[in-house]
């Protein structure tokens, strides 16, 4: 375990392409460790962390959601055994699993798990803790996808106000919260409000993260879609072309996010024919 631990990329790195080759090479070794150590083993928390990080890689890189869900469930079990039900690491693991369930289409399962995480975070960590705010954002996103737009908007607005006060305007959690609120406004028919908010997010991410960061590319994609629905087809095409080309380079031509941008680009071009 110590050898794999020392060779693993830093926290958050598995979200980004430079770390993916190493994550891919370490995946079978961590899976082998799973068979050697029981959940009650004294270093179970360290193995749980590795499982969670590899799940992040599987989602961000090859987009293998079922395999990621399996690793997240294993990590959550080990965190519960090693640290208890209400430890922040256990709650983060549960939250990550719920997000994966949402991405796989199990919206009721995701909602129930996220509500449980948020209730515990509020009681244990407080209303302004970053994990509590992240839980609010995650639950709001699930509510949005389930069609509860007023509920999603109220929760997104509360989370964004606290993010701004606690973390500042340019923190990545603040920008993610703003992006998600914009998507809710868009679904509610407030295209100008959504567009203005997405423009702020994209400008800030370009400056803070760079042109080809996955978060920046997501902002380009989202703003392009909003421009399309607003009738700004040339702006939409320019942004979506940048998003598609960037995702091809960063994520690969067959990644689901790249394919989404490709489909939208074709739709935008066709609308101008």
Image (cartoon, helix red, strand yellow):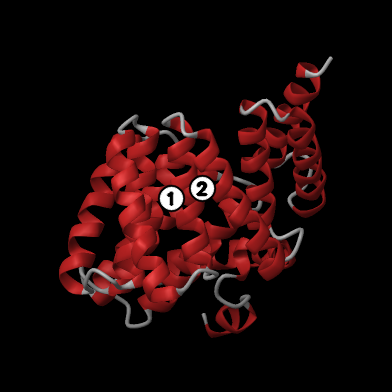
Q: Position of residue 139 (x, y in %)?
A: 32, 48
All told, the count of numbered labels is 2
Res. 90 in view: yes
Residue at 68% over, 67% down: 209
Q: Residue furthest top?
A: 273
Up-down relation of residue 269 to residue 82 (above or below): above
Residue at 70% over, 67% down: 207
Res. 73 in view: no
Q: Position of residue 273 (x, y in %)?
A: 84, 14
| Secondary-structure class at tag 1 | helix
Residue 67 got which mark? 2
| Secondary-structure class at tag 2 | helix
Residue 70 got which mark? 1
Q: CA distance from mark 2 to mark 1?
A: 5 Å
Q: Look at the numbered discs 2 and 1 and tell me whether their residues touch, using CB distance below 8 Å.
A: yes
Q: Is residue 237 left or right of residue 113?
A: right
Q: Is residue 3 left or right of residue 273?
A: left
Please rate how many residues cluster around mark 1, counting C-alpha atoms within 10 Å: few if below 14, some from 14 to 19, many from 20.
some
Which quarter of the picture shows residue 75? bottom left
């Amino acid at each position: 375990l110590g050898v794999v631990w020392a060779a693993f990329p830093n926290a958050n790195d598995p979200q980004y392409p430079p770390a993916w080759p190493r994550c891919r090479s370490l995946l079978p070794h961590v899976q082998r460790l799973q068979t050697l150590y029981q959940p009650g083993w004294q270093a179970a928390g360290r193995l749980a962390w590795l499982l969670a990080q590899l799940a992040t890689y599987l989602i961000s890189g090859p987009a293998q959601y079922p395999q990621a869900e399996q690793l997240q469930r294993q990590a959550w079990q080990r965190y519960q055994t090693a640290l208890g039900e209400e430890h922040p690491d256990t709650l983060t693991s549960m939250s990550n699993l719920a997000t994966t369930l949402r991405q796989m289409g199990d919206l009721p399962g995701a909602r129930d798990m996220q509500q449980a995480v948020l209730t515990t975070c509020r009681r244990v960590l407080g209303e302004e803790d970053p994990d509590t705010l992240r839980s609010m954002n995650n639950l709001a996103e699930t509510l949005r996808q389930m069609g509860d737009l007023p509920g999603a908007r109220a929760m997104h607005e509360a989370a964004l106000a606290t993010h701004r006060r606690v973390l500042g305007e340019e923190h990545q959690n603040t920008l993610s919260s703003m992006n998600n609120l914009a998507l809710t406004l868009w679904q509610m028919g407030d295209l100008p409000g959504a567009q203005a908010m997405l423009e702020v997010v994209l400008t800030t991410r370009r400056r803070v993260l760079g042109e080809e960061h996955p978060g920046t590319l997501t902002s380009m994609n989202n703003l392009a879609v909003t421009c399309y629905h607003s009738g700004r087809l040339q702006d939409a095409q320019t942004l979506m072309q940048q998003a598609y080309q960037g995702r091809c380079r960063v994520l690969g031509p067959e990644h689901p996010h790249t394919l989404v941008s490709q489909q939208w680009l074709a739709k935008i071009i066709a609308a101008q024919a």
